[in-house]
Image (spheres, rainbow, N blue to C red):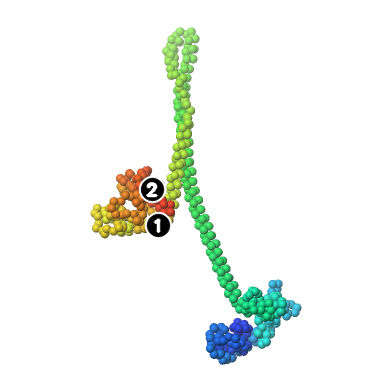
Amino acid sequence: MSADGSSLCENQFLCSICQDVFTDPVSTPCGHNFCKECITKYWDTNVPYKCPNCQKMFYTRPELQVNTFVSEMVAHFRQSAHQRASSSSSEQQVAQPGDVPCDVCTGTKLKALKSCLVCLVSYCETHLEPHLATPGLKRHQLIDPVENLEDRMCTEHDKLLELFCETDQMCVCMLCTYSDHKSHDVVPLKEEYQRQKVEVEKTEAEIQQTIQERRLKIQEFKRSVKVSRDNANREIEDRNSVFIKLKEAIQRNQDKVIKTIEDNHKATAREAEGFIKELNQEISELKKSAELKQLSHSGDHLYLVQNFKSLNAAPPTKNWTEVRVCPASYEGNKRTLAQLLEMLKNETKKLLTEFELKTVQQFAVDVTLDPDTAHPSLILSEDGKQVHHGLVEKNLPDTPKRFSTFICVLGKQSVSTGRFYFEVQVKGKTGWVLGVARESANRNGLIHLSCKNGYWTLWCINEKVFSALTETPVSVSVESQPEKVGVFVDYEEGLVSFYDVDAASLLH
């Protein structure tokens, strides 16, 4: 071990009873060390005898042996502490505002290192040395430096407040137990300190737990805000897409209407231009009548006879009285506007359906067909993703799960809450029926597919006839033969929806 006292820690040489540096250290049979006087007094009041540290019981009072090794180490520690105090007294910190000053220092006050509850004085490192070296002072109770030590004295008896009255819940001195607190439940202040310390630690732990819960809640709220922001951004993006498409549709139809109006005007203009050209030609012909007038005034017989036949053109005979050029009429604009509004309505409906389909596709599930439910004439692919009608019925066990008459098969997936979506490829099929079924729905014998019987389905016959199989089948009109049908189930809403995926239209 190094001879340097700095390598020694004061806590290594404290008696656990008096909380001071060992005086005449002795060892118990269990190996723990105490001041000889401390353990002797402790055992004088505690029978059977036990170790204050490990609580080991001794049914006969052990013989205490002086621990020479610890005694030497304590002596070495005190010598080192004294040397450090002597060499570093000039380096001690001067008491600053907020620090507890040494009560013994004269002139410049140094920062107190400990306060003595017996002397009611605070000491710097130098002035604390007697309490570490003098046997009589070593028994004094030292604590971390505190101000107003007089507050720790009983104002009535001028004695140290070293007891706690559980009856009145207040600190008292020894003499108080013979006067105002006589016959009250009184315990040593240290014992009450230990009890309340446990309560404080428990409360502190609860507070820390509460703080942690609050922090977790804050994180939860922040995550919710982030999710809300992401959802809002996605919704804004989707809505903007819808509005852009609507504006494009409006622009297309606006251009179409303007073109129709311009075409009407141009037709009117062309008609008027044709009439004007024809009239100009007639005017040119009529101007020849002026030459006839000049000829009629001529006295030259030969000139009149020779030129009359060439000028004797018949005047125009067309009657222009009833000929009209009517300006293009836009009285039909109301009808055109109604058509435009209907078009916008259809465009909006289509865009909303596209958006709706995009939304429900987020709830897509992977469906695998269950061979235990398949009718014997159905053939399933190995991965359970495809099915087609076979020519021969297989010899399969007839179980309650299997469809015995109706040529059908169910998926393995079973859902009893929330929302889900799946798609079925029907391209090239002349007839099909698909949808969802209640797990308890009848599968044996002739089955009437209806909601009442636990089947929500869409039916196609001969590629042309489509029906929703409710109690009374409802005809479903389609613009074109669907190639892929999407099925969406909202369990809480009790709603089953069928979509033409490629056309992005709601079938039923």
Q: Are marks 1 and 2 in contact (CB under 8 Å)?
A: no
Asked if 344 appears above or below 229 in the picture, the reply is: above
Question: Residue 95, can we see it?
Answer: no
In this view, which residue lies farthest toward the right?
107
Amino acid type, label 1: Ser
Q: Residue at x 46, y 39 (%)?
A: 341
Q: Quadrant of the N terminus?
A: bottom right
Q: Where residue 333 sits: x, y (%)?
A: 47, 34
Asked if 175 appears above or below 238 in the picture, the reply is: below
Compare residues 271 and 299 and report the one nearer the observer: 271
Amino acid type, label 2: Asp
For residue 500, the mark is: 2
Q: Nearer the viewer, mark 1 or mark 2?
A: 1
Residue indicated by mark 1: 416
* Image quadrant assignment for residue 394: bottom left
Q: Residue at x 45, y 21 (%)?
A: 322
Compare residues 48 and 359 and report the one nearer the observer: 48
* Image quadrant assignment for residue 349: top left
Compare residues 156 and 356 and report the one nearer the observer: 156
**Is label 2 in a helix, a strand or a loop?**
strand
Q: Residue at x 62, y 82 (%)?
A: 19
Q: Residue at x 49, y 15 (%)?
A: 290
